[in-house]
Amino acid sequence: MYDYLIVGSGLFGSIFAHEATKKGKKCLVIDKRSHIGGNIYTENIDGINVHKYGAHIFHTSNKEVWDYIQQFAEFNRYTNSPMARYKNELYNLPFNLNTFSKMFNLITPQEIEAKLEEERKEGLAKLNGREPANLEEQAISLVGTTVYEKLIKGYTEKQWGMPCSELPSFIIKRLPVRMIYDNNYFNDKYQGIPIGGYTQIIEKMLDGIDVKLNYDFFDHREELENIAEKIIFTGQIDKYYDYKFGQLEYRSVRFETEELNIDNYQGDAVVNYTDREVPYTRIIEHKHFEQGKQLGNEVTEGPSVGKTVISKEYSDKWDATKEPYYPINNEKNNGLYNQYKELADKDSKVIFGGRLGQYKYYDMDKVIAEALKLVEVEL
């Protein structure tokens, strides 16, 4: 018998297992994948730590969370400054004076603000005083047609798999527009990437804890439900309850990863492709997370010299055969999730956590905060 069965070895489950074990509880962690770490898993390929499930850039303004994660790895000073490529034009993200200066061939904040205001007025004029009815109208009313057409429309349609004119306006209620020359994507005080990748963090958290991989909860449910006093479940909450109220919806992502015999493919860790004709949403070049231009140092020796690894990322329609990545938090799905949550709140056997268990798009720092909150309450 175990005190806790933890289903899923991502951040949420691993933090809980680590803290529970420190308090003398006996834990079993299972994962249906062949590795620990969930979606933050990194694999070392020729000295390059490859983010197997998409770019994971740690950022937070929560000092407690930052101090907690620092126990398990040393972080570099990586600053996320992605690029957006529209056809043969390159723009800085997030939208800032560098972006607008190149787009409109203007320089001062006053000139650029006047140009954006002019474009916004054109968009608002088409609404005739009514509220934006869809994402397209909302975006144009916020930043104008030029920015929308080049940097928002194609990328968003690929991301969601449908036209912007059919997407709800609340998805893009506000757009960060910075009237400074600053390409730092996040405003958070603490930012970085663990030197040596994320997998080492989970390895240290789970050190000395029983772990079973390639072990799907649903294939062994009868046995597993009787093996522990409580279950910490980080999978899909609707699947746990056998879709009693219906199936929650997600978007999925697929990756095409290539190893190339060159030093530097794109000069940045993340380049978004914003025109509709390019089928992928972005290309990640993994070596730049830990070396290269972001850290201001040139790598002249080691296994990654003369090699790089890139991943093309495709947004994908989800079905039960694919990995669920992003909850679709519209009114219909949120209502359905609340029905499952009411069921879970009455269930003394199981506690749900993480992006799938709580049906929320969590960044890593929020997952850590939620896990520590559960530790405080439960232990």
Image (cartoon, rainbow, N blue to C red):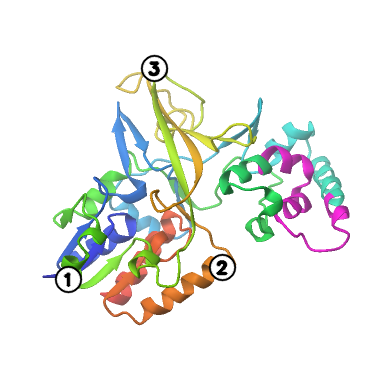
Secondary structure beneath dot 3 equals: loop
- Residue 270 as seen in the image, left or right of residue 194: right
Residue 286: image x %, image y %?
Answer: 41, 33
Whether tag 1 and tag 3 are in contact, CB under 8 A, the answer is no
Mark 3 to mark 2 CA distance (whole Å)? 48 Å
Q: Nearer the viewer, residue 263 or 61?
A: 263
Residue 117: image x %, image y %?
Answer: 83, 49
- Which residue does the numbered mark 1 point to in the structure image? 228
The amino acid type found where label 1 is placed reads Ala
- Residue 59 as seen in the image, left or right of residue 347: right
- Name the residue: 35% across, 43% down: 194
Secondary structure beneath dot 1 equals: strand
Badge 3: residue crowd in 10 Å (few <14, some 14–19, many ≥20): few
Residue 59: image x %, image y %?
Answer: 46, 51
Q: Nearer the viewer, residue 182 or 12?
A: 12
Residue stretch in magenta: 123-152
Give the number of the disc on residue 261. 3
Give the number of the disc on residue 332. 2
- Name the residue: 84% across, 55% down: 124
Earlier along the polypeptide chain: callout 3 or callout 2?
A: 3
- Name the residue: 40% across, 60% down: 356
Q: Quadrant of the N terminus?
A: bottom left
Q: Is residue 23 visible?
A: no
Residue 181 vertical position relative to residue 369 in the rendered view, above or below: above
